Image (cartoon, helix red, strand yellow):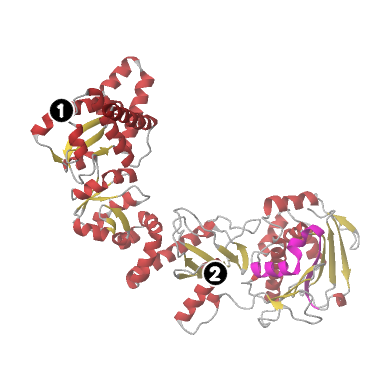
Amino acid sequence: MTLPDTPPSPTADRTFQVDLRGLVDLLSHHLYSSPRVYLRELLQNAVDALTARRSLEQGAPADAFGIRLYADGSVVRVEDDGVGLTEADVHTFLATIGRSSKRAEQIADQRADFIGQFGIGLLSCFLVADEIHVLSRSARTPDAPAVEWRGRGDGSYTVRTLPASTRPRPGTTVTLTPRADAGEWTRPAQVHALARHFGSLLRHPVTFDDGTAGPGGQGAPVNPEPAPWARSHPTPGARSRALAAYGEEVFGFTPLDTIELDLPAVGLKGIACVLPEAVPAGRRHGHRVHVKGMLLSEQAEEILPDWAFFVRCVVDAESLRPTASRESLYEDDTLAAVRDALAERLRAWIARAAASDPELLGRFLQVHHLAVKSLAVHDDEIMRMLLPWLPFETTDGHATLDEFARTHRTVLVTSSVEEFRQVAAIASAAGLGVVNGGYTYDRQLVHRLPEIRPEVTVADLDPGTLTAHLDPVDRETELAASAYLAQARDALAVFDCDVALRTFQPASAPALLLDSREARHERTRSQLAREQQGGVWGDILGALRQEAPRAQLILNQLNPLVRTAVTIDEPELARTSAEALYGQAAMLSRRPLRPAESSLINRSFLDLLAHALRKDS
């Protein structure tokens, strides 16, 4: 919107030089998340006016100026004792909305200490009202007249200059006449609730009156107390309890602990509440961010790094920059610096707990070990401090690496969860110390254990390592089973699987399938390459096929079923039993079965059933 070169007379009707209805539709559908923001915008305008008034009258008492809200169902009124507007201000702030000229930029610079911009905020009221009435008197000039601005939903507005007696005291009153369909946001109880929601931490006194206070009534206080971190407390314990109680009131859970946040460089204060329950990795919680006391957002994810998903924060800052909607934060260097500084506060809290409160650290790690692992991967200090105390899934059960390293000087780590499940019982029986490295961050962290425990060796587990720890059978037994093993290898060649006979505990396990995810991927890649190349290249790749890693089905000679199977001399039955043992071992590995493996399991079961029925008959 722009002003004409020659302003018309003060009482003339004027029209916004944009499509107001289109602008309001843009605000409601693309800028603001909900019509409820109209009250926040009015409060922001009032706070900015009070800020400017205090700069004029710096010696005034802290409670000399305030904000008064009124709603009785027919009108919504917001009155402040701020600096007020002159007629020139009215034209500047209500007729240059969206202007990007040098003059508009100068106005923005002048208002850098304020929360919002008067004009665009006032237009948000058209989300709930068809008419907005503004009555203001400037505090900059003692005998300044009152100025009335009346805007309508059809895009027209009027400006009048009125006698000073119309408004005896400086300040501004904005009165809305709500539309019939806006009752959800303009009922007295809702206006009061919205005022508390947005303005509970405002530094200026705010009151609300629903018409029951009577003439001269003061109304109910909206923000009766400052933020708990801004109040004095008799003891550190009392302060901690007050902060925890506030966190519970805001977020609805009792914090495991509260971390006080204070960044004087940007005027930020607040608390981080440690969640009492674990959350999935990477699930970022929204944080409550206030700017100069006004609630900006309840879902400000960008205030903390991704790894800090074990806390929820409520902060109030002076220097963070809101976006155009004033419902999130603008990503700039200041926000990046704040995020880094808050991350350092969380690291410092973990370090203090590790050094002086092992009971709190234990409860924290029990709940949030995954978050700490994600931090330790990228933070050497945290890694060295907490890695020995982090829990991992091992062949000795869930244990810390410190406990595990006491009994296993060589630590083997798997590359996947399924690999660990394949080998856990047998590795444990063989006396091997294996850690499940398949979970996020675990494999990386286990490999760094020697940095803290130099006497410990860490290596990736591979099939050869485990096979080497399985006891071989005697030569006579091997020769007796050779015919069966040949039949088994032939039956399982389609799965690139070799077959061997060993003895291992537990004896109840008939077979062990050793087949890493990487090996399966390599075999699949090789197969596709052969199919695509064909001809001579396909023959060459086929000749090199033996270089691709193969799966291994290890039969357990200690198992009665296997001892019986290796004596089978009927070729078809031998093949079927080998397929059944392979299928059972594949299912026990808990990895996803390929379609061919599912088909094999069904076929071998039916074939064995048919053989048993024929034998009985």
Query: Reading the chain from its start, which is encountered first: label 1 or label 2?
Result: 2
The x, y position of residue 576, in whole percent, is: 28, 28
Q: Given the image, on which type of amino acid does mark 1 rest? A: Ser
Residue 580 shown in magenta? no
Residue 171, percent across and down?
A: 77, 73
Secondary structure category for the residue under label 2: loop
Which residue lies at the image location 61% right of the left edge and 78% below the top edge? 225
Front in this rendered view, residue 545 or 482: 482
Q: CA distance from mark 1 to mark 2?
A: 79 Å
Q: Which mark is residue 482?
A: 1
- Name which residue type carries label 2: Gly
* Label 1 residue SS: helix
Q: Residue at x 91, y 59 (%)?
A: 12
**Boundaries of the magenta span:** 169-198
Q: How crowded is the residue under tag 1: few (<14 C-alpha within 10 Å), some, or many (20+)?
A: some
* Left or right: residue 362 compared with residue 296: left
Residue 83, quarter of picture: bottom right
- Outermost residue, front side: 617
Residue drawn 19% across the image and 26% down it: 486
Q: Which residue is mark 2?
A: 267
- The answer to whether 335 appears left or right of 145 in the picture is left
Q: Which mark is residue 441?
A: none
